[in-house]
Amino acid sequence: MNSLSVLKAVLLGVVQGATEFLPVSSSGHLVIAQEILGIEIENGGLVAFDVCLHFGTLVAVIAFFWREISEMISSLVRRPSDDRLRSGMSVREARKLAFLIIIGTIPAGVLGILLEDFFDSLFSNPLAAGFMLLVTGAILWGTRFVKGEGAGVAGMGVRHALLVGFAQAIAIIPGISRSGSTIAGGLYTGLSRDLAAKYAFLLSVPAIGGAALLKAKDLAALSGENAFATAVGTLAATVVGFACIKWLLGVVRRGHISWFAPYCWAAGLATLIYIFVR
């Protein structure tokens, strides 16, 4: 099929918006959904469509964390102090968190550039996505055994940022959840539940934005007919993504992120069965 219907675009936008932030792998679900729906946009259009959906979720996370993001930016030009900002962070903590987000972005940036062709090849491989969903389930299930509240921004260091950043880099592989691996990585390295979730979401801003910029050249592949459907799908991804961020923060704070593990296992197994018996 060379054109994309509005209905299918909305369905994929909902899938992207929900799975980008829920720990079940947006890229894996998009690869699988595109396979099931039979979407094959020619001349790089499918890559461009995926870029737009990810841009929609980028807008969602920026809108949700606008206060924290604006405070981190302003802290870079202010004198460090312990004065509390509206988000609850001090100026000093806001500046530190901004620095740690930059550090945490490095692993994904390096691997994304060095292994771009390899990662791109996986986006047309539903078999790999299904298997990696099983891996994501194992990562999430392990968080059941993490105890204690962990460190806040004051106790977070470069080690935490690099380890969580490496978890984000691995999540470039379809089927490995970016939010799931980074939140779990934060918990495994000793961060508090609240900071692990917040840092994971904020870390997605440069990651999604950078990936979108690298693929921006592919936007020209969208035809006029597909462009409208893509715009509607992108809007759906933004709205659903915003709602899912709010819900998942509550889930993580209650220590229930492992609840998503059975779903990942079921989705992974269902995908593998579908691939082998179709």
Image: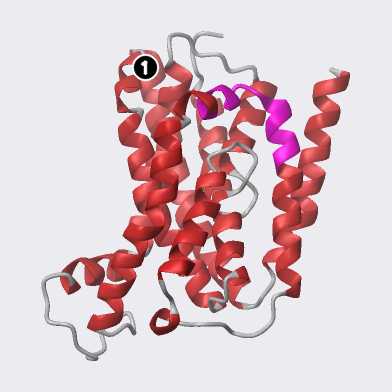
Q: State the image quarter where residue 221 is shown.
A: top left
Q: Residue at x 41, y 27 (%)?
A: 230
**In the shown orientation, is residue 125 left or right of residue 265?**
left
- The image position of residue 278, as x and y in percent, is 84, 17
Screen quadrant of the N terminus = top right
Q: Residue at x 59, y 76 (%)?
A: 253
Q: Residue at x 29, y 66 (%)?
A: 99
Near-viewer residue (276 or 232): 276
Q: Residue at x 70, y 60 (%)?
A: 140
Near-viewer residue (233 or 175): 175
Residue 86 in sight from this viewpoint: no
Residue 153 in sight from this viewpoint: yes
Decide: is 188 above or below 177: below
**For mark 1, does the 10 Å Cα neighbourhood hold few (<14), some (14 to 19), or many (20 or more) residues?**
many
Q: Is residue 100 magenta?
A: no
Near-viewer residue (76 or 160): 160
Instruction: Give the main secondary structure of the magenta stretch.
Output: helix
Decide: is 185 above or below 133: below
Q: State the image quarter where residue 215 is shown.
A: top left
- The image position of residue 116, as x and y in percent, is 45, 28
Magenta span of residues: 119-132
**In the shown orientation, is residue 44 left or right of residue 79?**
right
- The image position of residue 117, as x and y in percent, is 48, 23
Mark 1 belongs to which amino acid? Leu
What element does badge 1 sit on? loop
Residue bearing mark 1: 222
Q: State the image quarter where residue 232 is shown.
A: top left
- The image position of residue 25, as x and y in percent, is 61, 45
Decide: is 52 above or below 19: above
Give the color scheme: rainbow, by chain, secondary structure or one colour.
secondary structure
